Image (cartoon, grey):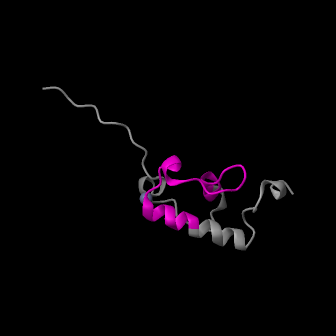
Amino acid sequence: MRFKMQYKRKICKFCENKEVPVDYKNSSTLKRFLTEEGKILPRRITGTCASHQRQVVTAIKRARNIALIAYSADVKNV
Ligand SMILES: [Zn+2]
């Protein structure tokens, strides 16, 4: 009996590792979901599931509000 190889799909980071919280204070994690320009990466690139993506987006917006994440690349290294 042949074993059918399963297509390796991206797993949502937050589903995979439940110890990593989607938190606006966790800026180092959130930065992985941002481009160099500080734009939020789409779900198809990060592989994040819909519910976590929504949490990530909310957390990023919150982090921006309190200036944990820079709005643009210009102020990144100040
Ligand atoms: Zn998820």
Which range is magenta?
A: 29-57
Rendered location of residue 31, percent (x, y): 65, 55
Compared across the picture, whether 24 is left or right of 7 comes to right
Rendered location of residue 19, percent (x, y): 48, 60
Residue located 59% across and 53% down the image: 41
Residue located 62% across and 57% down the image: 40
Which quadrant would the N terminus be assigned to in this image? top left
Compared across the picture, whether 4 is left or right of 33 comes to left
Compared across the picture, whether 71 is left or right of 54 comes to right
Rendered location of residue 32, percent (x, y): 61, 52
Residue 9 sits inside the magenta stretch: no
Residue 42 sits inside the magenta stretch: yes
In the rendered image, the vertical position of residue 38 relative to residue 7, given as above or below: below
Compared across the picture, whether 75 is left or right of 47 comes to right
**Where on the image, by quarter, is ligand 1?**
bottom left
Which quadrant would the C terminus be assigned to in this image? bottom right
In the rendered image, the vertical position of residue 10 relative to residue 52, given as above or below: above
Residue located 50% across and 66% down the image: 54
Rendered location of residue 64, percent (x, y): 70, 68
